Amino acid sequence: MSVTIANLGFPRIGPNRELKFALESFWGGRSSEAELKETAASLRRETWLKQKNLGIDYIPSNDFSFYDHVLDTTVMLGAVPERYGFKGGKVDLATYFAMARGTTSAENSVTAMEMTKWFDTNYHYMVPELVKGQKFSLASTKALDLYNEAKAAGVETRPVVLGPVTWLSLAKGRDVDPFDYLDDVLAIYTEVLTSLAKAGAKWVQIDEPAFVLDLNDKQRAAFKKAYDVLSKTGVSLMLTTYFGRVAENIDLLTSLPVAGIHVDLIRGSDDYDALLTKVRPDTVLSLGVIDGRNIWRADLDALVDWIEPLAEKRDLVLAPSCSLLHVPVDLKAEKKIDPEITQWLAFAQQKLEELAVLKTALTKGRNEVAEELAASTKAAKNRRSSPRIHNEAVAKRLAAVTPDMAKRQSPYPVRAAAQQAKLNLPLYPTTTIGSFPQTSEVRQARAKNRRGELDNAGYTQFLREQTAATIRWQEEIGLDVLVHGEFERNDMVQYFGEQLDGFAFTNNGWVQSYGSRCVRPPILFGDVTRPKAMTVDWWSFSQQQSEKPVKGMLTGPVTILNWSFVRNDQPRSVSCRQLALAIRDEVVDLEAAGAKIIQIDEAALREGLPLRRAEWQTYLDWAVESFRLTASGVRDDTQIHSHMCYSEFNDILPSIAAMDADALSIETARSQMELLQAFASYQYPNQIGPGVYDIHSPRIPSVEEMVNLLRLARKYLPADRLWVNPDCGLKTRRWEEVKPSLLAMVAAAKEMRAEEKAK
Ligand SMILES: Nc1nc2c(c(=O)[nH]1)N[C@@H](CNc1ccc(C(=O)N[C@@H](CCC(=O)N[C@@H](CCC(=O)N[C@@H](CCC(=O)O)C(=O)O)C(=O)O)C(=O)O)cc1)CN2
Ligand code: MET
Ligand SMILES: [Zn+2]
């Protein structure tokens, strides 16, 4: 029996974010399309050759993307929304980027496609939009081109395409059900797969992560039909599922006429026994045994123990659980992580090396890789017993948490009265979500400080000037509740990770979040403590600049958890409670320093919802409890705000209400306040700041459109429970956009106050 190894996808951004910089330079008009394409081609070539040298048997091609692989699929299918003026033929790069980012030129301004979370990751994809009478055509041959490109570089690859059922499941139909287009879509997939077969591709990896979702009958029928059709195209299909358990979908999965099936055994290990009995003996089984979503090194010897008996019975492919898109490129680039912790970690490069060791152990015997196996065992043992991980005091504190600690002293109406007596805010108070533009000047200063070219005093002075000027400007335009601007923060999660004990952070551990934007998720490896106050100094400095209230600004425990690489040696709920206690201390310190309003961002609370509905409530219970634990250490007259961006709350309103934030700012601008209807009918009791303009677009909103949105909001909620704010923070925007937008926003609030008075 044979054991081979596969990779499902390699990070695209490059070992030093080469693609990010090439994209931004191209968009900024500082380099040509040819230069961008050259950078991309050399990154691809490097990546293929690296994998070939590592001995990977199935090397992916077409895992590369200039922006997003879902967008690539939309373009492949020719499903270009009308506003981009696509006339048939091939979609060019300008149209592709217009779809991804919109355009703002005076004569031709189009909005970007909508963007949302890719399953439960912090990667974002462009949502396919389908309309009545939607036309499809083969509008990109990228899959074929990149297969040929790899071949020319001497590397035989297994092309990756996103599967039709997942693509349709992610699509939004306007007055139309995306699944009505199954046949049209399959016709294009047939063309693509046939062309790959003709070019010599033996296998194609067809990604169908939708298999780990709760499927409806339409999706089930579509899977059957799709793979009946696509299995006749002359390539062997490796039907690839990931991000969770296949569970009850296993009979459907194993009934499909495909040559191979890949499953995620990190998150879906409970499927294992059923798989062994249900996958036909002639189907190639690909086991995702290396964690593609997290950065922990595998315990290879234990894995060999586990796989060996199975490898004697059937042909196996071993692979990461999912594409390595979600982990950083190479641990070797890290200079600052403590050596003890470093030995516990594996990034994309190391994960492929682990696979190579596994293969050797299983095919040639453990002796061939005795040293590597021993090192892996040693690291696993060390991590289990390291005193760095376990902190007695944290465990004790957690055990001593009482239900009262997660409850404010009085119910909302009592608190609201006490807060208003202190704050004396007008109706429709105006505020922003926290960050102001992270200009390249700000980032440069931080980079210089890091490199030692700007000393700490100089850097602090620079940040103070930025902060003070921003406060002054907010006062000038008449905002009611101010923010300090977050100039001192590299990222809302990483900034806190860097100041808490129990976290390690990387200097080059970048992961793509969307397009050219990347994050460096901190690594939560041990029990969490807060050595000292993290934000109080900056808050105090800021409050000294103004008579108006400046919000204390924190990232909440659930968001820190969901956007970090977290421990796999204890439940996420436990890590979350530890974070909650640490941030709670910060909340209390801010109050003691004089903060009247404290915002605890939970941008990732809604997004962290499990993929399966049956698991929602358990998650929501501990997530909401963690938030409350963070927020409830303060007096009644201290106002707690929270903020969430992706606000699909309809199904989870009871949990949102249970957070009991005094005020909650949410994203609503793009959906015309639709969501507020749900808040109203649920009789959501506290204050809401429905975003009045979309910060993802450079477009400057008019007073009139914001007034219209606020009037809509007023239909659903009383004036004294409404705030006026943008959808999200302003860090990715430019001052030229922010200034006129906020001026208009303040004017809109004034108009609403006048209207209310006239009533
Ligand atoms: N963690 C996280 N997840 C999130 C969000 C978020 O804000 N944070 N927001 C939502 C959308 N996702 C986003 C993800 C990233 C960015 C973003 O702006 N990322 C920045 C990097 C932010 C950062 O860490 N900046 C560092 C380092 C920046 C850097 O590259 N510095 C240069 C030098 C400076 C320069 O020349 O610009 C270098 O080191 O070489 C800093 O400011 O210090 C980027 O890709 O450009 C925005 C939104 C959802 N998920
Ligand atoms: C992604 S949510 C962002 C919240 C944060 N306070 C900011 O304004 O940037
Ligand atoms: Zn936000």
Image (cartoon, rainbow, N blue to C red):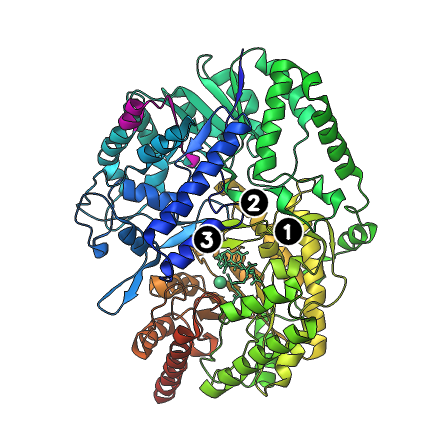
Q: Quadrant of the C terminus?
A: bottom left
Mark 3 falls on what kind of element? helix
- Which region shows up in magenta? 193-209
Badge 3 density bin: few <14, some 14–19, many ≥20, Cα 10 Å: many
Specify whether tag 3 is near ligand 1 (CB below 8 Å): yes
Q: Residue 199: within the magenta?
A: yes
* Contact, mark 2 vs mark 1 (Cβ under 8 Å): yes
Q: Identify residue type, mark 1.
A: Thr
Q: CA distance from mark 1 to mark 3?
A: 18 Å
Relative image position of residue 726 (x, y in whole percent): 43, 70
Badge 2 density bin: few <14, some 14–19, many ≥20, Cα 10 Å: many
Residue 20: assigned label: 3
Q: CA distance from mark 2 to mark 3?
A: 14 Å
Mark 2 or mark 3: whose residue is earlier in sequence:
3
Relative image position of residue 614 (x, y in whole percent): 51, 40
Q: Nearer the viewer, residue 567 or 515?
A: 515
- Name the quadrant containing residue 750: bottom left
Please give the name of the residue rendered at 80% of the width and 42% of the height, measured from the top-left corner.
386
Q: Tell me the residue that label 2 is attached to.
A: 328
Residue 231: assigned label: none
